[in-house]
Amino acid sequence: MSETTLSQVAELAGRVGHALVVSADAAGLPHVAVADEVAFLSGSQVGVSAWYCPGTLDNLQANPRLSLVAWDGTTDEGHQLLGEVRQVEDVAVMDGYEPNATRADPVPQMRRRFVVEVTKVLRFTRAPHSDAEEFVSS
């Protein structure tokens, strides 16, 4: 696995406009979110940005491991990145977006970027495949 591969995965996510972020709580209950930006940072790290819901953040506090899927359904080209969140960065704040909210499930007010240390890369496709993993060199 090379930096070029991680850069290509980030480019694929940009081309399709999103990536799936899968987290799980301490008991293993999964949760899927959608990120609208994936960026190769350096070495074996990527940044994954979105207006994440509280469930994703709660999961990562209890269990920092996640799966990130960038997949083009038209060409069936894709990768699944497995790794661990090393840092959560606040990127933007919607000040007063919903000042009089009375909903029990408020819309996220903070855009965040997860810095992910990628440990494994799997091919992701609907076609038959082996799930053979590539290890990122440290």
Image (cartoon, rainbow, N blue to C red):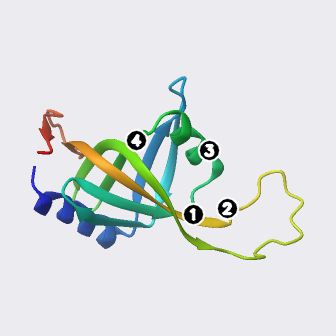
Which of the 4 image quadrants contains residue 101? Answer: bottom right
Counting residues from the start of the chain, the first of labels 3 and 2 encountered is 3
State how far apart marks 4 and 2 are (Cα). 20 Å
State how far apart marks 3 and 2 are (Cα). 11 Å
User: Where does the image place residue 61, in percent across and percent down from the top left?
Assistant: 55, 40
Counting residues from the start of the chain, the first of labels 3 and 4 encountered is 3
In contact (CB < 8 Å): disc 1 and disc 2 = yes
Image quadrant occupied by the C terminus: top left
Q: Which residue is mark 4?
A: 66
Compared to residue 51, the image places residue 2 above or below, namely: above
- The residue depicted at 71 percent of the width and 62 percent of the height is 107
Q: Amino acid at mark 4?
A: Leu
State how far apart marks 1 and 4 are (Cα). 17 Å
- Neighbour class for label 2 at 10 Å: few (<14), some, many (≥20)? some
Q: Which mark is residue 55?
A: 3
Mark 4 residue element? strand
Q: Which residue is mark 1?
A: 51
